[in-house]
Image: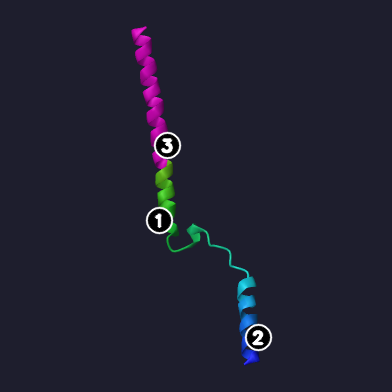
Amino acid sequence: MRVVIILFVLLLLAWKFWPEPEPMAVEDTVIGEPVKRLQEAQQFEDQVLEEAEARKQRLEAAIDDDSG
């Protein structure tokens, strides 16, 4: 009985101090391709929003020049 308890304690200690594996990057998992597509879509959306903001500023500047 003592051997079983010692073995159990040793197994618990080994389990506690066993190093955890490094987490995988999302791109390397099964959902990697959809994540890449979402990142590309986010970049495209950011680009469109920047262009829209620049166009808005140009139009506001043109309106200010025409009215002033």
Q: Residue at x 40, y 50 (%)?
A: 38
Q: What residue is pinned by disc 1?
A: 34
Q: What residue is pinned by disc 3?
A: 47
Quick one: quadrant of the N terminus? bottom right
Q: Secondary structure at mark 3?
A: helix
Q: Residue furthest front?
A: 2
Q: Quadrant of residue 17?
A: bottom right
Residue 28 rendering spot, x and y as whole percentages: 50, 61
- Above or below residue 22? Residue 18 is below
Callout 2 environment at 10 Å: few (<14), some (14 to 19), or many (20+)? few
Q: What residue is pinned by disc 2?
A: 6
User: In the image, is residue 65 part of the stretch drawn in magenta?
Assistant: yes
Q: Secondary structure at mark 1?
A: helix
Q: Amino acid at mark 2?
A: Ile
Quick one: quadrant of the C terminus? top left
Q: Secondary structure at mark 2?
A: helix
